[in-house]
Image (cartoon, rainbow, N blue to C red):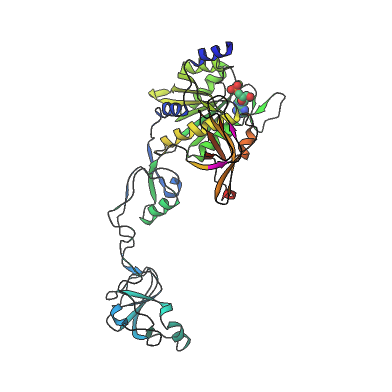
Amino acid sequence: MVHHGHSHRHYGESMLSVEEALERILSFFHVLDTEEKPLLDALGQVLAEDAESRYDIPPLDNSAMDGYAVQAADLKGASKETPVELRVVGYVAAGHLPTDTVTPGTAVRIMTGAPVPDGADAVVPFEDTDEVERRAGSGEITEIGIHFEVAKGADIRPAGQDVRAGALVLAKGSTLRPAEVGVLASLGYDKAKVVRRPVVAILATGDELLEPGEDYGPGKIFNSNSFSVAAGVLRYGGVPKLLGIARDNLDSMNAKLQEGLAADMLITSAGVSKGDYDMVKDVLSQHGKIDFWSVRMRPAKPLAFGVLDAPAGRKVPHLGLPGNPVSAMVAFEQFGRAAIHKMMGKTVLAKPTIEAVLDEPIHNNDGRRVYARAIITRQNGTYHVKLTGDQGSNLLTSMARANGLAICPEDVPKMDAGELVQVQMLDWPEDVF
Ligand code: AMP
Ligand code: MG
C-alpha cells in the first residue's frame, strides 16, 4: 500500500495508454527543413517537391523487339508455307534516328528501343521471319520473308506510354525507394530535394556503465542502450550522435545535456524509474520541461518526455527511455521511431503489424499492453508465433532471438494458443518466407 501511494504521488497522474503517450510526444515534432542532394544519397528520404517530367518517356514510338519494321497491311495471308517477301531498305539501332522510310513492300531492320521509321505501323520479331535461314545462305540480307500476319501497332511502344511530358510523376511526400530513385533518374534528375534526416543525440546515464572497449570492472556493465538505440535511429533514417555516458550526478548530467542541444531530438536512457528520477528531474527542470509518465505497456512502463531550451529559442524534444535494455528498445520502437519518421516527413507513423497464430499463451496479469518478444515462423503459408521464453526486461539476448513483438491488448488477461495475435515485425528475415 505504501508503495502504491508513493508511485501515485510521483507519477502524478493515471497511466497513459500507448496511443495517448504517442500523441503527446508527436505533438512536439515537426517536419524538418529540406536539402538537395545527389539522387543515391537521398534513398529512404521523403521528396520535398513534386517531380514532373520535362519529356515523354519513351521519347518516340519505338520497337519492343529486335525485328523488322513493316506495314501491317503488307502481311495479309502471310504464313510459314506462304511467307510474304519484303525488300529490306535500311537498319536502325537504339539511340539513332531512322534515315529510311517504310513504303508498301519494304521493311527496315530494327533493334529493341530504336525509333520506328516513318511509314511503319508494326514490328515483326526476328523469330517470325526467315532471317536465320537467309543468314546461313548468302549472309547479306536484302529481302526478308515474314511468316505471320500482324496487327497494326504490334510490338510498337508508343511515345509517352510510361510518362507524359508535363505530368506529375512522383508527388511531394513520396518516400524514395529504389524504384523512385530509378524513376527520378529516368526523368533526367541527378539530384533530389528531400526532407533532411534528423540528428538524434543519444545519452546513457548511470554510474555502473562502461563504454564497450573499456576494461571490464567489478560491478560494472557495458553501455548497450546507446548502441541498440543508435542502431535503431540509423535503421529508421536518422543520424545518431553518441554523447557517451552521464554519471548519476548533477554536474555530469548538466555537461552532457549541453552537447545534446544542437540535435533535433535527445534520447536518454535510464533514470526514469522510481528509484532515481529525482536527480534527473532536478537537472532537466533547469533546462526546460520534463514529465514522468507511466505508460500502460509491458515492458517500458516508466517513460520521461520533455523539451529542452536550446540557444536561439530552439526547443529540443527529449525522450527519456527506461534503463532496462529491452524496455529501452521496445519504447524506442513505439515512440522514437514514430518521432523520427514524423521529422522525416513520413505520414504513416504506425508500425505495421501482421496477424499470426499463437503457438503458446501470452499472460497479462496487470492490465498493460504486452509487447512479447516473439519468434515468427511461416508454416504452410501461415505465420506462427512462439515466445522467446523468460520475458524479463533485462534480457537483451531475448531481443536478439526475437524477430517480432506479439501484442496482447491491455484488457485481455490471457491469450491462448491457437488464437490470432497482432505482431509488429522487427525484421523480415529471409528464413520466415
Ligand atoms: P535505471 O533506470 O537507472 O534504474 O536502470 C535500470 C536498469 O537498466 C539497471 O539494471 C541498469 O544497470 C540498466 N541500464 C541502465 N542504463 C543502461 C545502459 N546504457 N546499457 C545497459 N543497461 C543499462
Ligand atoms: Mg541508474
- Residue 359 in the magenta stretch? The answer is yes
Front position in the image: 313 or 114: 114
- At horizontal 32% and vertical 46% (from top left) the residue drawn is 50
In the picture, measured across the screen, residue 52 lies left or right of residue 133, that is left
In the picture, measured across the screen, residue 105 lies left or right of residue 352, that is left
Q: Is residue 422 shown above or below 102?
A: above
What secondary structure predominates along the stretch shown in magenta?
strand
- Can I make out residue 143 in this image? yes
In the picture, measured across the screen, residue 65 lies left or right of residue 105, that is right
Front position in the image: 321 or 357: 357
Q: Is residue 197 shown above or below 119?
A: above
In terms of image quadrants, where is residue 119? Answer: bottom left
Residue 165 at what x, y percent from top left? 28, 57
Residue 360 at what x, y percent from top left? 61, 38
- Can I make out residue 71 in this image? no
Residue 288 at what x, y percent from top left? 44, 19
Residue 149 at what x, y percent from top left? 34, 79
What residue span does the magenta drawing correspond to? 356-363
In terms of image quadrants, where is residue 247? Answer: top right
